[in-house]
Image: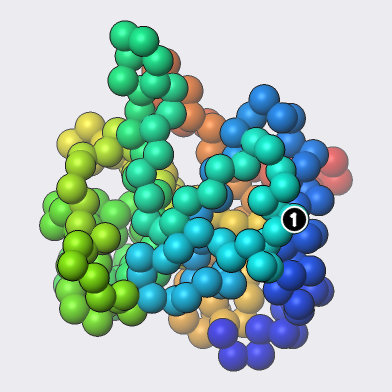
Amino acid sequence: YPSQSRDLEIENIEEQYNKLAEILKRVRKDIKIIISPGNHDGVRLMEPQPVLDEKYAWAIYEIPNVVMTGNPAYVNIGARNGFSGFDVLLYHGFSYTYYAGNVPSLIETGLNAPEKIMTYLLRNRHLAPTHASTQFFPSENDGLVIKKVPDIFVSGHLHKSAISSYNGVLLISNSSWEEETENQKKRGNKPDFCKAPLVNLKTRAVKILDFEGEREKGR
C-alpha cells in the first residue's frame, strides 16, 4: 500500500521471511505450522496464489514442521483410521473489501464484520463470485469455487478477529500482529491485533487468547 515503508522495520522481502523463520523455529517441532500466502507476500497478487517462492522464503522451507499451501487451499486436520478428520478451507480474503463496499446487506458493517462476508461467500459457493472483486488468474478450472463444504473456514486480510458459524461450518477470521495503520484508518477498517483463536476439535469451542491485553497489563 502507499508509503508502507514507513510502517516497516525490515523492507527487504528475503530478510522479512528470514525474520519470520527465526520466530517460527521457536514453535515446538511436534506442532504443524500451515502457511498460506496473502496479498502482502512475495507471490503474484492474482488469485489463486501459489505457495511462497523458495527464492525469497528459503529459510521457512528449512523448517521441518512447516506445511506450505497456496491461497485458497483445503487442508485436513486429524484424519486417522476410522475418522475422516476436519476439512479446513483457507482463504486470505482479498475479495472481502469489494463485498463490504458493494453488497447492500454488508455495507452497514463494512470491513468490520468479516464473518458476515464469509457467510455471504459460503452461500454463493465461491470465494469471489463477482467478476473483478479480486484479481483473477485465468485457468480451465476456477480455483475459487467452493466445491466441497468445509468443516472450518479460516481467513484473515481484514485483521479483524471474529468467530461465527453458518450451517454447521465454523467461521474463523484471524486478527494480525500489526497495530492499526494510517492506511487502515483511511479505509474505515478498525482492526483487532494480537488475538489468537484456539479451537477445541472435540467440542468445536473456540477460545481467544488476547496478547494485546497481556501487553497492556505489562506482562
User: Do we see residue 177 in this rendering?
Assistant: yes
**Residue 2 in the image: above or below residue 118:** below
In screen coordinates, is 48 left or right of 40? Answer: left
Q: Position of residue 30 (x, y in %)?
A: 67, 25
Residue 55, position as x, y percentages in the image: 66, 68
Kindly indicate the quadrant of the structure image that contains residue 78.
top left
Quarter of the rendering containing residue 149: top left
**Model colouring:** rainbow
- The residue drawn where x is 62% and y is 82% is 182
SS label for mark 1: helix
Dot 1, crowdedness within 10 Å: few (<14), some or many (≥20)?
some
In this image, 199 relative to 64: left or right?
left
Q: Callout 1, which amino acid?
A: Ala
For residue 69, side relative to residue 101 (left or right): right
- Depth check: 42 or 218 in front? 42
Looking at the image, the residue that sits furthest to the bottom is 2
Which residue is at a point 37% across and 56% down the rendered structure image? 72
113 up-or-down from 139: above or below: above
Q: Residue at image x 18%, y 67%?
A: 140
Asked whether residue 161 appears in the rendered view, the answer is no
* Mark count: 1
129 left or right, relative to 117: left
For residue 117, what is the image quadrant?
Answer: bottom left
> Furthest residue to the left?
124
Query: Residue 163's spot in the image, x, y percent?
Result: 40, 42
Quadrant where the C terminus lies?
top right
Q: Where is residue 208 drawn, in percent x and y? A: 55, 37
Find disc 1 in the rendering and name its residue: 59
Quadrant of the drawing holding the N terminus: bottom right
